[in-house]
Image (spheres, rainbow, N blue to C red):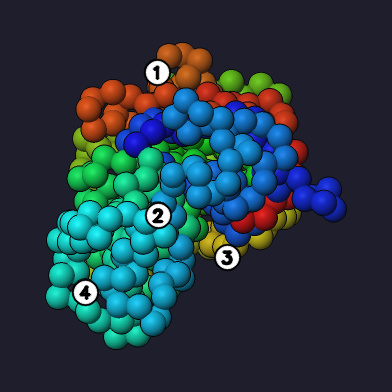
Amino acid sequence: MAAITLKDINKRYGDGFHAVKDVSLDIADGEFVILVGPSGCGKSTLLRMIVGLEDITSGELRIGDQRVNEKAPRDRNLSMVFQNYALYPHLTVYENIAFPLRLAKTPDKEIDERVRRASDLLELNEHLERKPANLSGGQRQRVAMGRAIVREAQAFLFDEPLSNLDAKLRGQMRTEISRLQKRLGITTVYVTHDQVEAMTLGDRVVVLRRGVIQQVATPRELYENPVNLFVAGFIGSPPMNFISATVTGDSLHTPFGEWKLPSSRTVDLSGHEVVLLGARPEAFEDASVVSDTVREHGVVFDATIDVIEWLGNEQYAYVPYEAPEDIRAQLAELERELDSEALRTQLVVALDASSRIPEGTPASIWLDLRRVHVFDPESGENLTVSALAQRGEAEPNQPAATGDGRRPAPGPGTTDQPATASGSATESGEAPATS
């Protein structure tokens, strides 16, 4: 096992295309780090540079205390699990797991011990004599993981390993990977476009956009304190709601009325005529089920709900509204970058399952103003997070503790522009990238 350090990593292709831009990241020994972002953000390119399948244009990559930029993939002692499993169809499960050990001319007795140990760990004992064609998708994925385990590498690298599985199996395998990583305590870098995987698996999550790190933080910090519009719109399902507001003194005029933020959420709005307010769906509620003691921390407004999705333990209500043309254009652009259609000028409101608001009728909705974020619509910066950090009331991007109680070194990304909230990028000025 070993730490992985990336310093000012860049990737340029022969045609001048700048895929990864000045990425700096410290991954602690034993840490589970997720690389996440929409298609074309550079996450897979970055992973392939770590393992040695892509050359590094500039910057330094260290595994443990060794610089490995010029080392071949086989000399980096890393194990990679691919999206398509990369199993040999003519070999049994046993021989697929043993394959890297046979290449390394490991003694037969040691091969058998390692394969049996890995199969015990992954519950594959009864399948050792079967071939991949006779296995389910989840079993094939476990075989691929077993092959990575027996190598006893310094780190595991996963490239969207669950994307070929159905939803139920993805959930099961997600849990298995998490348990396995905790049990082995091995440094792990995991690429995914699935934010559920990102939020449930990693100690820290690295959000990438066009080859630039936007934010490095724990899953909770990403969700509760996104540093810009991009992160806020990408993390969370449904994503954060964005509401345009005109600034008048310390009041905010929205399509749903005039709101005034509590002192704990105040920001310097001088120089801003229009801002975007961000609120997660769960910050809203049916006003009729909110107690008086809680109600005073928010605002009640009237809205007409056109669609309700009932999910059993909760329900989502959709409230369309009109926004200025420039705001609609900006949200449309953000939708395209996020491969999303969710950032329309509508509210997605999470309602208690006991709410009985019918579709197509006016309703009173309550919003907890303590959970509202203020964004600069031009730069995309989260003004609330910046203000909290300046006042010392928040610790953006605080990394999660590792298994032995240590905290891994922070890993902010360096960018080609001013950064906010511990090295996280603002919205504008990045070059496109491939994933």
* Horizontal side of residue 14 vs 300, given as left or right: right
Q: Which residue is mark 1?
A: 393
For the C terminus, which image quadrant? bottom right
- Dot 3 or dot 4: first in sequence order is 4
Work out how far the residue at label 4 is from the one at label 1, CA to CA, in angstroms.
Answer: 55 Å
Q: Which residue is mark 3?
A: 341
For the N terminus, which image quadrant? top left
Secondary structure found at label 3: loop
Work out how far the residue at label 2 is from the one at label 1, CA to CA, in angstroms.
Answer: 54 Å
Give how far across and how far down residue 79 sits, in percent.
41, 51
Three-letter amino acid code at the position of disc 1: Glu
Three-letter amino acid code at the position of disc 3: Glu
Secondary structure found at label 2: loop
Give how far across and how far down residue 364 sits, in percent.
36, 55
* Horizontal side of residue 224 vs 253, given as left or right: left
Q: Quadrant of residue 100?
A: bottom left
Kindly identify which numbered label has been placed on residue 104.
2
Q: Is residue 55 above or below residue 9?
A: below
Secondary structure found at label 4: loop
- Dot 2 or dot 1: first in sequence order is 2
Give how far across and how far down residue 252 sits, in percent.
56, 35
Work out how far the residue at label 4 is from the one at label 2, CA to CA, in angstroms.
Answer: 21 Å
- Dot 3 or dot 2: first in sequence order is 2
- Dot 1 or dot 3: first in sequence order is 3
Front: mark 3 or 4: 4
Front: mark 2 or 1: 2
Give how far across and how far down residue 30 sits, in percent.
32, 36
Image point 20% across, 45% down: which residue?
Answer: 183
